Image: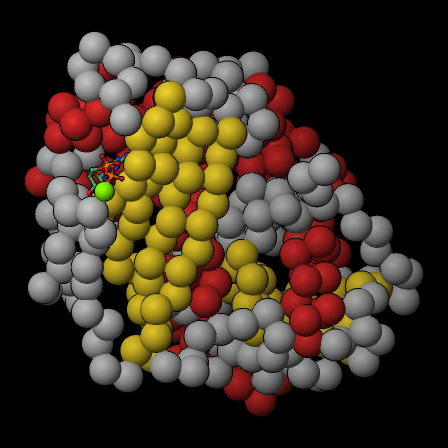
Amino acid sequence: MIIGAVGEFELIKRYFACPEIAQIQGQHTSGLRGIGDDCALFDIPVGMQLAQSLDTLVEGVHFPVHCDPFALGYRALAVSLSDLAAAGAEPHSFTLGLTLPSISELWLKEFSEGLTHVAQKFRLPLIGGDTTKGPLTLSLQVQGLVPKGQALLRSGAKVGDLICVTGTLGDAAGALRAVMAGDTPEDCGDAHIKYLLSRYWYPVPRLSAGQWLRQAGATSAIDISDGLIGDLRHILEASGVGAEIAPELLPTSFALNQNHGRDNALTMALTGGDDYELCFTIPRELAQTLPAKLSDDCPITCIGQVTDETGIVRDSQGIPLIEKAYTHF
Ligand code: ADP
Ligand code: MG
C-alpha cells in the first residue's frame, strides 16, 4: 500500500531492508529468505521447536505521544524478546507491522537505528513485515528456537519449588513520572532518575538467563511485564499452586531506594510493571546449582516458595498480597 510521497517500497528499502538489520546472521539463519518476497522462509533445525510471540504497542496507550524514536525502537524489540527469554528460547528472527500517521524520514531513521541496535546485539534479522497508514502502532513478532519439548512454560511449578527473580524490580515503575514528562536517560541530569529511565527505555531481555534456566531444570518461568504479583499469579494459576513470598527479600536497585525510599521501592517491586525481569520456579534441590549472579548485571534472588493454595500469594506472615498489576481494560 502507498502511504505517502516516498512510497512504501522505498521506505522499506531505506530503513528496514538495509543490510544492517535485514542481513544479520544468527546461529540458525542459514538458508533464510527474508524481506522482498511475499513470505519469509526458513528451516527449523531437526530437534528444535519454533517459539513465537507477538506484541502490539499503541502510541498514547503503551508509550507516550512524541517519545524518542530511537528509544521506542530499542524498547519495542527488547520487550518482545523478553517473551523468548521467558520460554528459554534462542532468538531467530522478527517481523514488524508498522502503522504510521505520516512519513518522517528522521523519525524512521532513528526508530530503525533503535531496532537495529537490539537486533545486532542479539543476532536476529528483520525478515518481513507490513507498513500501513494510521495512528502510530507497532506490532513486533519474534521467532525463536528451543529444543523440542523443553521450552519453559508457566505451568510446571511444583509445591516446594523455590520462587526466584532475575535483576532488580520496580525500576521502570520508579521512572514512570519522568517517562510521562517526556524525559529520556540522555537528557536527564539526576544520576538516579537517569538510571531508572534507562531501565524503562532500554530493558535487557534476559535471553541468556532464560536459556541457562531451561538447561538448569527450572520448572516454570514468566517475564515480569505487568508487575510481580500479577505475573507470578499467572504461573500459579497455570500450575495449580500458590506462593509464599517475603517482600523484604525483593531485590531493588540503589537508585530506586535512593529516589523513592525502600518502602515505596518495595511496593513498586511488588506491583510495578515494565521491568522485563524473569520470575521462575526451580526445585529446591537444584537451587544449590544457582549462582548468585548469571552475569554482572543479572543477580538471581530467591524470594519465596511454592505452596499448595491454588492462586493465592501470601507474605511470610500469611497475609494475602493484593494484586495491583496493570490490566489492559
Ligand atoms: P504484500 O503486499 O505482498 O503484503 P508488502 O508490499 O506489504 O507485500 O511488502 C513487501 C515486502 O516488504 C515483504 O517482503 C514484506 O515482508 C516487507 N515489509 C513490508 N513492510 C515491512 C516493514 N515494516 N518491515 C520489514 N519488512 C517489511
Ligand atoms: Mg504479497
Pinpoint residue 157: horizontal percent, then vertical percent.
64, 78
Residue lying farthest bottom? 285
Could you tell me if residue 139 is visible in this image?
yes
Pinpoint residue 318: horizontal percent, then vertical percent.
90, 66
Q: Nearer the viewer, residue 135 or 325?
A: 135
The image quadrant of residue 291 is bottom left
Please give left or right for residue 287 compared with residue 121 in the image. Answer: right
Q: Nearer the viewer, residue 65 or 1?
A: 1
- Residue drawn at x 29%, y 50% is 94
Residue lying farthest top? 5
Q: Quadrant of ligand 2?
A: top left
217 in relation to 177, above or below: below
227 in relation to 135, above or below: below
327 in relation to 282, above or below: above
Q: Quadrant of the N terminus?
A: top left
Q: How is the image coloured?
A: secondary structure
Pinpoint residue 85: horizontal percent, then vertical percent.
42, 61
Q: Nearer the viewer, residue 11 or 124?
A: 11
The image quadrant of residue 321 is bottom right
- Residue drawn at x 72%, y 37% is 329
Q: Nearer the viewer, residue 285 or 21?
A: 21
Please give left or right for residue 313 compared with residue 108 in the image. Answer: right
- Residue drawn at x 59%, y 84% is 283
Pinpoint residue 171: horizontal percent, then vertical percent.
57, 39
- Residue drawn at x 52%, y 78% is 218
